[in-house]
Amino acid sequence: MADFLTAFESIDTDFSGEITREELEAYCRKQNFDEKFVQKWLNLFDADNSGTISIDEYCDTLGLRPNTEYMEKVQVQRSNAAPADDDWMNGVKVIAVDKALNEDLMRLIVRLAREAQAKHTVEKDIAMYIKDRLDEKDQAAWQVVLGRFKYGSFVTHENGYMLHFFVDRFAFLIWRTPNY
């Protein structure tokens, strides 16, 4: 089974914890594999149809646990990829924002989204990391939804407490629930 993990690690050349279509195509060319290999792997391992294969998807499909040394390299890569504090909006695409949301809170939410992705690979763990910290900070109920592709939503949020954005691998919809 170690050979399967070695294969993933050989393809994920940037230690992002994900194999992109481009990395898979480059690997196939290098190994002289048929180009059908790329689509077969995506069909088999890309459980969320994101166009990438995460280490979690790969290991879940094969019943494996990721190699600790590899995951440490992934964590280092993700940590190093975070922008400097003065460039905190680098790589952030805002979809919707409550006009009353103050910049300090927006900065905190984006920072937590980056931290969560550096520390965790499973979506529910990323969401829980962000929610726990926001709940603790405000002693209020925050909600966190994240995904890779389209999803619909209609939420009621407290005035000044909603942000919908992309950063790194995911789109995030984060809001504070009003007290009634």
Image (tube, rainbow, N blue to C red):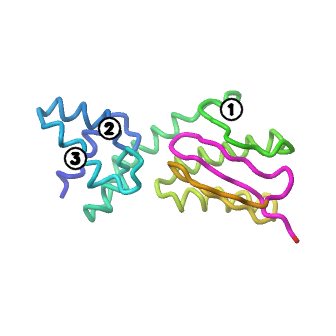
Query: Label 2, label 3: how many angstroms apart (C-alpha)?
Result: 18 Å
Camera-nearest residue between 69 and 111: 111
Answer with left or right where residue 67 lies relative to residue 128. Answer: left
CA gap, disc 1 and disc 3: 35 Å
- Crowding at dot 1, Cα within 10 Å, few <14 / some 14-19 / many 20+, comes out as few
Residue indicated by mark 1: 85
Q: Which residues are magenta?
A: 157-179
C-alpha distance separating marks 1 and 2: 31 Å
Q: Secondary structure at mark 1?
A: helix
Q: Residue at x 34, y 42 (%)?
A: 19
Which residue in the protein does label 2 denote? 21
Q: Tell me which label, 2 or 3, sits earlier in the chain.
A: 3
Front-most of 72 and 123?
Answer: 123
Q: Which residue is mark 3?
A: 6
Which residue is found at the position 27% from the left and 38% from the top?
24
Residue 26 drawn above or below residue 9: above
Badge 2 marks a residue whose secondary structure is helix
* Residue at the image point whose x is 32% and y is 38% from the top: 21
- Left or right of 141, for residue 129: left
Q: Which image quadrant for residue 133?
A: bottom right
Mark 3: which secondary structure? helix
